[in-house]
Amino acid sequence: MKSYPRYLLTTVIILVAVAAVTYSYRDYVTNPWTRNGKVMSYVIQVTPRVTGPIVKMPIKDNQHVKAGDLLFEIDPRTFKVNLDQARANYDQTLDDIAVLEKQVEVTKASVSQAQSVISQVNSEIKAATSQLADVEIRLKRNSHLITKGAISEQHFDSVRIEHEVVTAEREQSTAALLVAQGDLLQAQATLAQARASLGAPGLDNARLRGAKAIVDQASLDLEFTRVVASVDGYVTNLTLQLGSHAAVNQPALALVDSSNFWIDAYFRETLVGSMREGDSALVTLMGYPDSPLSGKVDSLGWGTAQSDGSTGHNLLPNISPTFEWIRLAQRVPVKIRLDPLPEDITLRMGSTASVLVITGQ
C-alpha cells in the first residue's frame, strides 16, 4: 500500500509530460515556426543607357546613397557634340522650311496671276465674239448692197477688212486662252509640289518633328551620361573604377533598396494551410537574438521550383533517388512585412531569421 503514492506520482509526471508535449505540438501546429528565414530586399541592377569610359565616380563600396545621388558619370564630350550637331540640323531644317514656305507663296501668286490672265482673255474673247457678230451682220448686209451698186467698193472693202481684223483678234485671244490655261496647270502643279515638299504647317511638319526627335534623343543621351540612384539604398559589390568602360544595357553595379526590406520565411507545406494574409508574425534575427521584431504575413507563395526533371547531362532529366517510405514536405515561401524597426537594428539582405506566425486571430 505504501507504493501507491510512488505510482501515483509517476503517473502524474507522465500525464504532465504528455500534456506538455501535446500542448507544444498543438502550439507548433497552430502557430507555425521556422528557422529558415531570410532578410530580403529589392536589388536594382544599375545599367547604363549609353556607352563610354567612366570619368567621375564619387561613390565607394557599401556606401549609402539617396535617390538622385550621382553614382558615376560617363564621358559626355561625344554626346555634347552629337547634341550640337542635332541642334544645327534642327536650325537648318527651320531655314529649309522657311524657304519652302516662300516657294509656296510664290507659286500661289503664279496661280493667281494665271487665273487673272485667263479671266482677262475670256473677257477679250467675249468682246471679240460680240464685235465679230456685229461685223458679220454688216458684212452680210453690205455684200447684198454691193451687188445692187448701193454702196461703193471702198466702203465694202473697209467692212471686209474690219471683219478679218476682228476674226484674227478673236483667234489670237483664243490661242492666248490656251496658253494661259497651260500656264495655270503648270502653276498649280508647281504649287502642289511645293506644298508636298513643305509638308504640314507649323509643329505638325514631319521634317521638323524628325529633326526635333533627333535633338531630343541627343539630349537624352547626354543626360544618360550621368547615372544616378533611383532609390535610397546601399551600393554593393562595387568593382567599377575610374576609366572603366561602361557598356549600354550591361549591369554595372548593384543597389540594395534600403526602404523596402521584408522577410522570406520558408515553412513546410503542412504548416501553411492555416496561415492567412494579415496574421501577426514574430521575427528573430540571428544577428539580434535578444530583439524580436513584429510584423504581419503579407502573402503566401504559389509555387516553388523543382530540381527533379531539370535538364542534365546529355540533355537528359535530372532525377534524384528517393526512399519510397520517406516523403519530404516541400517548403513554401511566406512573405513577412515588418513593422517599424527600432533605431538600433540594421537589416542586411540575406541575413538569417527565425519566424513565428500566430494564426487563427
Image (cartoon, rainbow, N blue to C red):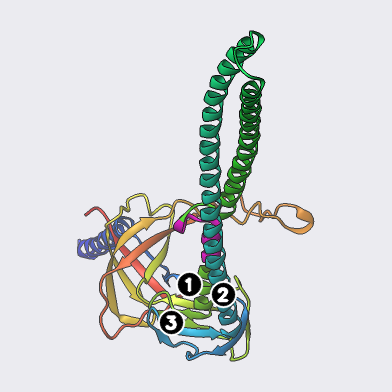
- Spatial distance from mark 2 to mark 1, Cα to Cα? 38 Å
- Kindly check if marks 2 and 3 are in contact, taking CB atoms under 8 A apart as contact: no
* Amino acid, disc 1: Ile
The residue at which mark 2 appears reads as 88
The residue at which mark 1 appears reads as 44
Examine the structure image and report whether residue 209 is included in the region drawn in magenta.
Answer: yes
Instruction: Please tell me whether residue 31 is drawn above or below residue 39 in the rendered image.
Output: above
Instruction: Please tell me whether residue 140 is drawn above or below residue 59 in the rendered image.
Output: above
Q: Earlier in the sequence, mark 2 or mark 1?
A: 1
Q: Quadrant of the C terminus?
A: bottom left
Instruction: Please tell me whether residue 351 is drawn above or below residue 356 in the rendered image.
Output: below
Q: Is residue 351 visible?
A: no
Q: Residue at x 55, y 76 (%)?
A: 83
- Spatial distance from mark 2 to mark 3, Cα to Cα? 42 Å
> Magenta span: helix, strand or loop, mainly?
helix
Of residues 335 and 21, the one drawn nearer to the viewer in this rendering:
335
Q: Which residues are magenta?
A: 202-214
Q: Residue furthest right?
A: 314
